[in-house]
Image (cartoon, rainbow, N blue to C red):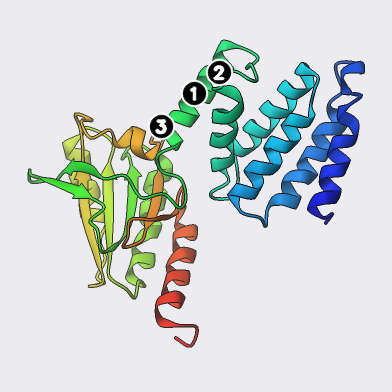
Amino acid sequence: MRTLLTALALLLAPLAVCSAQEENRYAGLDSLLTEFYSALVPVDIEVKNAEMDRLIETCHDSLTRQHVTLEIFDHYMHARIMGEEAVAIHVYDEWIASGKVKMRGEFERMEADIFATFNRNSLIGMKAPEVTLRKPGGGELTVPVPGRKAVLFFYDTSCAKCRLESELLPPVLDGVEFPMDFYAVYTGTDRGEWRKFRRRLKTGNDNVSIIHLWDPEMDSDYQLMYGITATPKMYFVLEDGEIIGRRLEVVNLQEIIYYVTLVQNGPEK
């Protein structure tokens, strides 16, 4: 793999001549951008943000700057590496929302606005937003409760992937070796279907408390706070409220649980 500086140099070289080429002029640049993303994988978000700003600033031609900015935004908006979507939020704020770079159309701008609005409150390293939800028998609970590790699992009973994930969850929860709250948040409104789901999702592990919640009137703004535009969505939160996992699938949850166990008990455990 090329070093960061080498990858950056390769990217900057074609930018000065991009504007003189035809419609397919960005093909080579896009390929180098892909290499650039890979070279930046090991570094933290602040470094990624700074490098993207530096790259965009190098593009003096407005069309080239637009292309590079929107390619970067799209890549990190659909990031496969957990946490990298924070780069898309940075690019949105610094270049798109500020008006420095224009979107190609109204639909594209609307998609960018929605992404930023629904993701900026629950990024890795942030304090998990507190939301007040309703219990099955009435009453309310504000979650996550401070002082306990927690998982927030947002699901819908009509979602096939949610049903699959929920079937895989019990064995993982059975293996948790530390106190943990598991908040299963139903995003639908069918009380009967919710009741059936609650009966299926169980664990015999005394370390794990499964707490079923919902908000059929959507008064809590949990959709906005946790980016619930689709289900399932799952987060892992530490005792101090820091989010260390987002957009998790069960296999990712299992990895985080293993990591937290090692940190808590030491590698000899």
- Could you say whether the residue bearing mark 2 is in a helix, strand or loop? helix
Cα gap from disc 2 to disc 1, whole angstroms: 6 Å
| Residues under numbered marks 2 and 3 in contact, where contact means CB atoms less than 8 Å apart | no
Q: Residues within 10 Å of mark 1 (few under 14, many from 20)?
A: some
In the rendering, at what x and y percent does residue 223 appear? 33, 34
- Badge 2 amino acid: Arg
| Residue drawn 35% across the image and 71% down it | 176
Query: Does 55 appear above or below 172?
Result: above
- Badge 1 amino acid: Asp
Q: How crowded is mark 3: few (under 14 residues within 10 Å), some or many (20 or more)?
A: few
Cα gap from disc 1 to disc 3, whole angstroms: 13 Å
Location of the C terminus (image quadrant): bottom left
| Residues under numbered marks 2 and 1 in contact, where contact means CB atoms less than 8 Å apart | yes
Between 225 and 127, the one lying in front of the other is 127
Query: Does 231 appear above or below 199?
Result: above
Q: Name the residue under label 3.
A: 229
In the rendering, at what x and y percent does residue 265 appear? 40, 81
Q: Name the residue under label 2.
A: 109
| Residue drawn 33% across the image and 63% down it | 170
In the rendering, at what x and y percent does residue 5 appear? 82, 50
Q: Name the residue under label 1.
A: 113
- Badge 3 amino acid: Thr
Cα gap from disc 2 to disc 3, whole angstroms: 17 Å
First along the sequence among labels 1 and 3: 1
Residue reaching furthest to the bottom: 268
Location of residue 238 (image quadrant)? bottom left
Location of residue 2 (image quadrant)? bottom right
Nearest-to-viewer mark from 1 and 3: 1
First along the sequence among labels 2 and 3: 2
Nearest-to-viewer mark from 2 and 3: 2
Tell whether 4 sits left or right of 226: right
| Residues under numbered marks 1 and 3 in contact, where contact means CB atoms less than 8 Å apart | no
